[in-house]
């Protein structure tokens, strides 16, 4: 594929553009964290009887 953040990271790495690689990595991390919290909210709404995923288990 010739599109996307992974492609951009590979080409920036090949051209030794470390700042671009870290910027892409930061965007991917932010996207992943956002997706995690969205899925967590959806699961809490769909399965209200399940314990909260952020609550420690005793």
Image (spheres, rainbow, N blue to C red):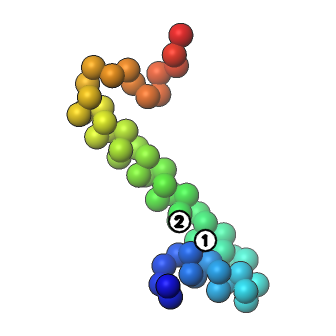
43, 38: nearer the viewer? 43
Viewer-side residue, 41 vs 2: 2
Give the vertical position of 14 relative to 43 (above or below).
Answer: below
Classify residue 55 as left or right of residue 38: right
Q: Quadrant of residue 43?
A: top left
Most extreme residue toward the front, as rendered? 1
Q: Residue at x 58, y 71 (%)?
A: 24
Which element type, helix, strand or loop, lies under badge 2?
helix
**Residue shown at 73%/77% (left/top)?**
18
Residue 25 visible in rendering: yes
List the single residue furthest toward the right: 16
Q: Position of residue 5 (x, y in %)?
A: 53, 75
Q: Which residue is mark 1?
A: 23
Residue 17 in view: no
Query: Looking at this rendering, what residue extends furthest in the top direction?
Result: 58
In space, the residues marked 1 and 2 are separated at their CA atoms by 6 Å
Is 5 located above or below residue 39 in the figure? below
Tell me the residue at 26%/24% (across/down): 48
> Which x, y percent locates residue 13?
71, 81
Q: Around disc 2, counting alpha carbons within 10 Å, would you say few (fewer than 14), some (14 to 19), or many (20 or more)? A: few
Look at mark 2 in the image and give the residue it sits on: 27
Residue at the spot 61% in from the left edge and 66% down from the top edge: 25
Is residue 29 shown above or below 43?
Answer: below
Q: Secondary structure at mark 1?
A: helix
């Amino acid at each position: 594929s010739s599109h996307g953040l992974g492609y951009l990271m590979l080409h920036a790495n090949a051209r030794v553009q470390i700042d671009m690689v870290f910027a892409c990595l930061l965007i991917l991390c932010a996207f992943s964290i956002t997706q995690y919290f969205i899925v967590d909210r959806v699961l809490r709404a769909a399965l209200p009887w399940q314990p909260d995923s952020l609550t420690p288990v005793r």
